[in-house]
Image (tube, grey):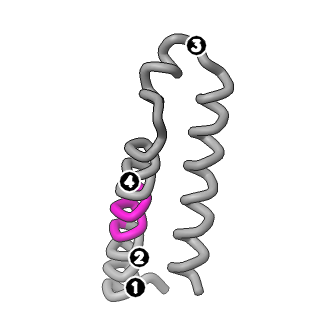
Amino acid sequence: MLTTAVLLATLVYAGIGLVIFVLGFWLWDRVTPVDLWGEVCKGNVAIAILAGSVAIALAMIISAAIHG
C-alpha cells in the first residue's frame, strides 16, 4: 500500500534527480564549444542525436545512483 511517507520520499527523490539532471545537462551544454540549441534549430541532426544521447546517459547514471 502507498503510504504518505513513501509518496513523499518518491517525490523528493524525483525532484532531486530532476535538479541534478538539469544541472548536469546545463553544464554539458556550457562546456561544448557550439551553441547546441542553435545547431539543432538549424537542422543539425548529428548534434541533436548527441544531445539526446547525453541526456539518456545522464538519466541512467542519476537513476542508478538514486536506486543504488
**First-in-chain label (3 vs 2):** 2
**Part of the protein shown in magenta:** 15-22
Is 18 left, or right, of 54 in this rendering? left
Q: Amino acid at mark 2?
A: Thr
**First-in-chain label (3 vs 1):** 1
Q: Residue at x 62, y 64 (%)?
A: 60
Q: Which residue is mark 4?
A: 22
Q: Residue at x 61, y 52 (%)?
A: 56
Q: Where residue 30 sits in the image (x, y, percent)?
A: 38, 43
Q: Which residue is mark 3?
A: 43
Q: Which residue is mark 1?
A: 6
Q: Amino acid at mark 4?
A: Val
Mark 1–mark 2 contact, CB under 8 Å?
A: yes
Q: Where is 47 relative to 2, above or below? A: above
Q: CA distance from mark 4 to mark 1?
A: 24 Å
Task: Indicate which label's residue lies in the foreground, 3 or 2.
Answer: 3
Mark 2–mark 4 contact, CB under 8 Å?
A: no
Q: Around disc 4, counting alpha carbons within 10 Å, would you say few (fewer than 14), some (14 to 19), or many (20 or more)? A: some
Q: Where residue 48 sits in the image (x, y, percent)?
A: 60, 29
Q: Is residue 25 magenta?
A: no
Q: CA distance from mark 4 to mark 3?
A: 23 Å
Task: Indicate which label's residue lies in the foreground, 1 or 2.
Answer: 2
Task: Indicate which label's residue lies in the foreground, 4 or 1.
Answer: 4
Q: Which residue is mark 2?
A: 10
Q: CA distance from mark 3 to mark 1?
A: 44 Å
Q: Disc 4 on helix, strand or loop?
A: helix
Residue, far top: 42
Mark 3–mark 1 contact, CB under 8 Å?
A: no
